Structure formats: C-alpha cells, structure tokens
Amino acid sequence: MTVLALSLILAAAFIHASWNYFLKRSGGGTAFVWLFATLSALIYAPLAAAIIWWVKPQFEWGHYGLMAASAVLHTAYYMLLDRGYRSGDLSIVYPIARGSGPLITVLCAVLFLQEEPSALAVGGALLIGGGAFLLTGDPRKLRESGNYHAVGFALLTGCMIAAYTLVDKIAVSVWLIPPLVQDWATNLGRVVLMAPMALKARCELAPTWQRAKKEIIAVALLCPLSYLLVLTAMVFTPVSYVAPAREVSILVAALMGTQLLAEGDVPRRLAAAAAMVVGVTCLALG
C-alpha cells in the first residue's frame, strides 16, 4: 500500500469517527438526521451532477431499484445509529455497530451461500465477538449504566451495515452505477423517506438547527467526504487492503468517547476496540 493510499484511508477513518462523534455530541433526533441529510444532498448535488454529465450513465429501472433499496437501508441505519447514541456511549455503540457489520456479513455468507471461511477469518470473527463482549462488560452494570438498549441498537445498526454494503456492492460493481452518484441518490432518497417524519416533527426543526447548527453542518460535510476518500484510495489500491485499514475508525471513536466525552472504563474499552480492529482485519484478509 502506498503512502498516499494509507494517508487517504486513515484520514477517512478519522473523519468517519468524527462525524459520529458530532452526531453523539449533538443529542441527535429525527430533526437532526433529516436536516443534515438535506444539507448534505444540497452540498454534494453539483458534484453528483458533474459526474452524471461526464460519465452519462444509462439508468434503467433496476438501477433506480438499487438506489431505492439502499436509501431504505441507509435510512434505517441512521435512525438506529441515532437511537443508539441517544441510549448509550459512543465508545460502546460505534465499535459494536462497525465491528458487527462484517461479522454478520460473514455469518450470512456461511449460512445462506455455503461459503467456507478460512481459519484466519474464523479467528477474526472470534476476536470481534470477544471484543464486543469485553466492551459491554458485566450485563448487570450494563443495564445500570443505561447502555443496555444501546447495544441492541448497535447490533441492529450492524445488520443494516451488512445489508446496505451488499446492495451498494451490487449497484456499483454489477450495475455500474458511479459510486458517488449511488451515495448521493441514497442520501436524497433518505431525505424523501424521512420527509413525513420531519413534517410531523416540524416544530423541532428550527430549535434543532439553532441548538446544533455546527454539528449539522459538520456531519453534512464529513459523512460523504469519508466515503469519497475511501473511493479514491480504491481506485489504485486493492480493496483487501482498504477495508481492514479503514476500521481503525473503531479505535478512533473509542478514543473520542473515552477522552472527549469522558465515558469512563478507558483501558477496557480501548482494549476491546483494538481487539475488534484486529478481528475485522483478519476477516478482510481471510
């Protein structure tokens, strides 16, 4: 892996963890998620339009179906992630959500596609499971700390990650939708899908903007940017190198939660996050 590729991936990992930190710090909510999705769609619309003008893709109903499916899954992903952060700590929700996604993907491949993972991949899966168990700690203390429901939301978020990863992979590799266009269309679809919820909570829109304007702008900018950096690295770097390297964001988010948000249990949570990073790396390489 070149120095440029590694720099792009590490920057993407830091940015991805950062927008999750801003989401957690803001207090979230339906209004917040809809506002940053709307702003993000507006910001990146010129770039998406430029790519469509340059590439001139020929879209059929199948293309639109994949965009719609990804929009539904991403909407569920952001809503579950938001609920997770409103229920528990960043240093618990983020690692479990990000780490369980690849693990669930492997389990589905074994159960439904009859794939046979290597010993390295199995070891990675065990490390992720062990890291998640270490991260959550004593179930009785977990319930007392208020993170009990957060773990459930994090695991559901991981399911959404596995699902939209599969859909987006088919969209960009089989149906050849330009990745940025797929991501932007998914974001626009999320705005449309959440519009009824935003309308129902319209009295919260202005107060949320006033309360968390900086966080909304930050997430709107950083969320797609982290993905763009990864895509750029993939142009000249094998995906088997990119995928494990970007999961350093798990450790970054754990550091942000323990240090910037003072979430406590620093040694245990960082050790658990590190184990999950190694586990995801083994899954990718195995």
Image: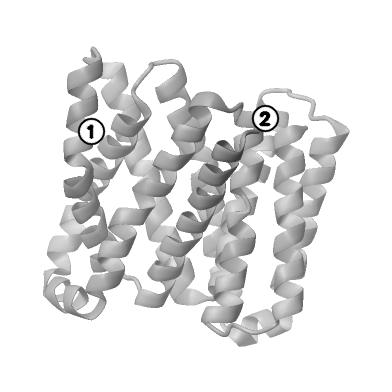
Check disc 2 and report its element: helix, strand or loop: helix
The image shows residue 33 at horizontal and vertical percentages of 29, 61
Task: Name the N-terminal-most of marks 1 and 2.
Answer: 1
| Picture residue at 80% right of the left edge, 59% below the top | 130
The three-letter amino acid code for the residue at tag 2 is: Ala
Side of 168 where 66 appears, left or right: left
* Label 1, label 2: how far apart the Cα atoms are: 33 Å
Residue at figure coordinates x 52%, y 81% from the top left: 261
Q: Residues within 10 Å of mark 2 (few under 14, many from 20)?
A: some
The answer to whether residue 277 is seen in the rendering is: yes
Residue 27 visible in the shown view: no
Instruction: Give, as a three-letter code, the residue at label 1.
Output: Ala
According to the image, what is the colour scheme of the structure? one colour
> 150 or 267: which is nearer to us?
267
In the foreground, 96 or 223: 223
Residue 93, x across and y down, in percent? 56, 66
User: For residue 189, what is the image quadrant?
Assistant: top left
Residue reaching furthest right?
Answer: 119
Q: Regarding mark 1 in the picture, which secondary structure is present there?
A: helix
Where is residue 127? Give x, y as percent.
80, 53
Task: Report the label total.
Answer: 2
Q: Please give the residue where the numbered disc 1 appears in the rendered image.
A: 48
* Above or below, comparing residue 280 to residue 219 in the picture: above
Q: Is residue 35 left or right of residue 5?
A: left
Residue at the image position 33 percent from the left and 60 percent from the top:
219
Q: Quadrant of the N terminus?
A: top right
Residue under pointer 2: 109
Q: Is residue 163 above or below residue 151?
A: above
Instruction: State the image coordinates of residue 120 (x, y, percent, origin top left).
Output: 84, 37
Q: Is residue 173 above or below residue 221?
A: above
Can you tell which of label 1 and label 2 is closer to the viewer? 1
The reply, left or right, for residue 19 in relation to residue 89 is left
